[in-house]
Image (cartoon, rainbow, N blue to C red):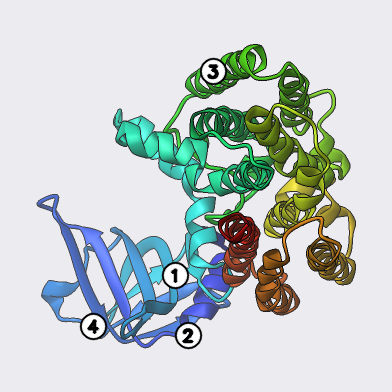
Amino acid sequence: MTTLTTREAVTRARGYRQAVLSWVGADGYPMSVSGSFRTDATAGTVVVGPLPTSSRPPAGQEVCVTFSHIRPQRGVGYDERRYINLWGPATHDGGSVRVVADRASGWDEAEVPFFEYAERNVPRARSYMENLGAQLRLSPFWKFFLATRLPFLTATIIPVSLGGAVAASHGSFHWGWFLLTLLGAASVHLGLNMANDLFDDINGADAANVTPTPFSGGSRVLQYGLVSRRGMLGACVGFYLFAAAIGLLLAATRTWSILWVGVVGVVLSLVYSAPPFRLVHRGLGEPVTALGFGPVMAVGAYLAVAQEWNWEPVLASIPVAIFVALILYVNQVPDRIGDAVVGKRTLIVRWPKARVIAVYTGLAAIAFVVIGVNALTSVSPIWTLAALVTVPLALRVRRGLVKHYDQPYALMPAMQDNIVLHLTSGLLLIIGYVVHNLLA
């Protein structure tokens, strides 16, 4: 809800066809009646009527005058949503009711998108619920699903699976060790997601972000009061401890080299957003993400399965590393205003639109070139060239950035395409290895 001056509200009211007059009757029940109206912006008054005598509030009664508009869109929902509320005492003006507005509020979807409007009212809604003594409730599964941002686990599944596929192409693969590695890597990832939410809640970045999307702005479970900070911290520490236990087991039974890879991964996940490092605040979030969700995970999986060092999982995972970094890169576009408010100086905050798009284009092109070079120089199987079919996806993301850079919700399809780009290209790289292994 946006507070308006009474003059502005009365002026805007002229764009509506009908007014609805509401008040509390003498019996304590609400009363409402609609009618035509005329306005005087200078005096801040609205005259509704003429109305039947039985449909007029008593003189001096506090009333609300509502103006609203909504357009149904078949098969879509609604758009063009807007409303204005005016409050003030009522007086009789012949057969009409005159209201001298003393306060006003309203919303226009053309100025503030619906999701942003809802987000801006979260503090007010939470205060209202607290005053009622009510508590928001959600099933444990959905709390877990939201707090961990479970769908983003594809960022872990792809590099770990790629590392396993490379090991299989070298004649070494074991499902048990591979799945255990995947479980440990996923635990670090989930712990990282929760840690990021905790730090962004503490520094105010998520609270300052009023345009979150399903792909950006954090899980929002802390902002909505669905999970406490203490509960979030406990779960975060639990995931890290579980991952550490798996890492120690793999190191002791497979190769101690895994221990150092695991340490690097955990350290990267912590310095990403934890003080005093907070590398994402310094514009280093993308390289940290690329390293952690590319070579580190791929090499870790390869070591767990093959028990020896090899450069191939490093080189094969470079495109995956670039694409996962680009997920973070694009997802920060809607967050840039809130990030800037709290001093979170990401690359998106630092750079103008043209440079952001140019860097996206350049990095995506580099990823595709690496795919081609790896295949043509026999670093990777020739079948991995299939990943080049995702070039149109990258072009769609670029077009979305050009067209909707300043429209967080209109940018959502491009953000989704960017995630699909990482997932699809990664899967095609893995499939390329699988086909090679089957034909070898």
Q: Determine which residue is flagged by label 2.
A: 14
Where residue 131 appears, as percent x and y from the top left, is: 35, 31
Looking at the image, which is closer to me, 436 or 201? 436
- Residue furthest out toward the front: 440
- Amino acid tagged 4: Gly
Per the image, label 3 sits on a secondary structure element best described as: helix
Give the mark nearer the N terminus: 2 vs 4: 2
| In this view, the mark in front (2 or 4) | 2
Give the mark nearer the N terminus: 2 vs 1: 2
Dividing the image into 4 quarters, which one contains the C terminus?
bottom right
Give the mark nearer the N terminus: 2 vs 3: 2
Q: Determine which residue is flagged by label 3.
A: 242
- Amino acid tagged 3: Phe
Residue 344 visible, this angle: no
Query: Looking at the image, do the residues carrying marks 2 and 4 touch, with CB atoms under 8 Å apart?
Result: no
Disc 3 crowd rating (10 Å Cα; few below 14, some 14-19, many 20+) is: some
Per the image, label 4 sits on a secondary structure element best described as: loop
Question: Relative to 290, is 226 above or below?
Answer: above
